[in-house]
Image (cartoon, rainbow, N blue to C red):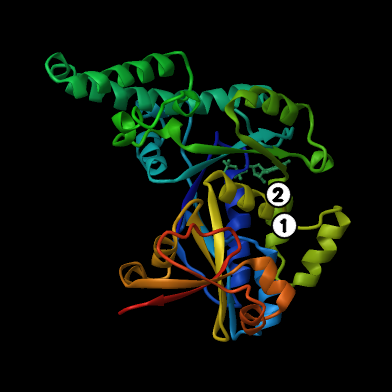
Amino acid sequence: ALQAGIVGLPNVGKSTLFNAVSNSAKAQASNYRFCTIEPNVGLVDVPDERLAKLAELVQPNRIVPTQIEIVDIAGLVRGASKGEGLGNKFLGNIREVDAIIHVIRCFEDENVLREEGAINPVSDKEIIDAELQLKDLESVEKKISRVEKQAKFDVKAKAELEVLLRCKAHLEQGKSIRELDLNTAERPAIADLFLLTEKAVLYVANVDEPSMHTGNKYSEALKEAVKGENAQVIIMNNSIEAQISEMENPEDQQMFMEEYGMKEPALNRLIRSAYKLLNLQTYFTAGVQEVRAWTIHEGWRAPQAASVIHTDFEKGFIKAEVIAYNDFITYGSEAACREAGRLKIEGREYIVKDGDVMHFRFNV
Ligand code: GDP
């Protein structure tokens, strides 16, 4: 599964958010499956209304949503890049994730200790960014010293070195690599470094309860500060999310959310945004055994999409039968779609669309 890692300064609400995620995963577990891989890793369903609508028509034995993995990366503090706190080990954990969920404290509460003085979301964000940038600078400098000599007589190494030097200058200005415009020819120069500040990021503005629908001056300041980053800011109240997730009875949850004027847990918004951030999309398989959602990247062709079900599916791929989601709902069944000419037979070159209901034919 794809991984998103939760980062942020201490006492901003990371664990509270992680608990909300893992509790909601546990609640779902009664229906089918759950695994906590490690204490700080949880799998969570990607909420998708289309799955239930397909299931209503197909009446399968089971419904299986697609999932993403959430990792709580604690221990990131000022000085982490120099080994402060649990620093380096945790920076290593970030290297492995596909996207970062950066939680920022936007609530006041005297009872929740804050080492950095008055609430200041922008400076909090900069502290974490600076640690990640310093770590990246280390990686970039290491590679520079490796290719420097070669660059004197090798054109390829020379081009690489130029990209690395640009990255170095950029990081030294306190900027993240994701804000640096690198083209597809330049990207490979840093691809092997798995830079931390290159990863896609999503900000969670953890606000207090009265501001959970509107945001507050802190979340506004944060939004303003990240405007140039093309990043999303999710306004939510992590404590309320944790409370929702602790309720075992869905009716209690519903009542609780109504009381707070919520249509769904904010967690759903967060997960959907993370999914979008990673350029992911979903296709479905719809049989009587199970109706199931599968995660792929935008732009994947049919054989690659088939490989997420089973690696053999890609090798032995022959054809795919494809029904657009809206057609499936309109006509009500695979048979009806076939009759109406809405079931298309597609080959290896077909680029899967979000919501496609797929049936693969393959050789074993
Ligand atoms: P972490 O260190 O970032 O993992 O922070 P925690 O999730 O452990 O939260 C630190 C403290 O802040 C705990 O006592 C939480 O109950 C409290 N907390 C978390 N979210 C909120 C919030 O939205 N509002 C308030 N007032 N307190 C919160």
Q: Taking the image as four quarters, which one is ligand 1 found in?
A: top right
The answer to which of 179 and 303 lies nearer the viewer is 303
Residue at which label 2 appears? 239
Instruction: Work out whether 136 lies above or below 215.
Output: above
- Which residue appears at 60% of the width and 78% of the height? 31
Instruction: Work out whether 3 lies above or below 122.
Output: below
Q: Residues within 10 Å of mark 2 (few under 14, many from 20)?
A: some
Among the 4 quarters of the image, the one containing residue 63? bottom right
- Which residue appears at 70% of the width and 53% of the height? 241
Which amino acid, by three-letter code, is at mark 2? Ser
Among the 4 quarters of the image, the one containing residue 184? top left
Residue 226 placement (x, y as % from top left): 62, 26
The answer to which of 67 and 126 lies nearer the viewer is 67
- Which residue appears at 51% of the width and 70% of the height? 34
User: Are the two marked residues, 1 and 2, in contact with CB atoms closer than 8 angstroms?
Assistant: yes
Residue 114 placement (x, y as % from top left): 62, 30
Task: Find residue 243 and name its label.
Answer: 1
Can you see residue 42? no
Question: Which quadrant holds the C terminus?
Answer: bottom left
| Mark 1 element type | helix
- Which residue appears at 54% of the width and 85% of the height? 289
CA–CA distance in space, label 1 to label 2: 6 Å
Q: Is mark 2 within 8 Å of ligand 1?
A: yes
Instruction: Work out whether 121 lies above or below 330.
Output: above
Q: Is residue 291 left or right of residue 142?
A: right
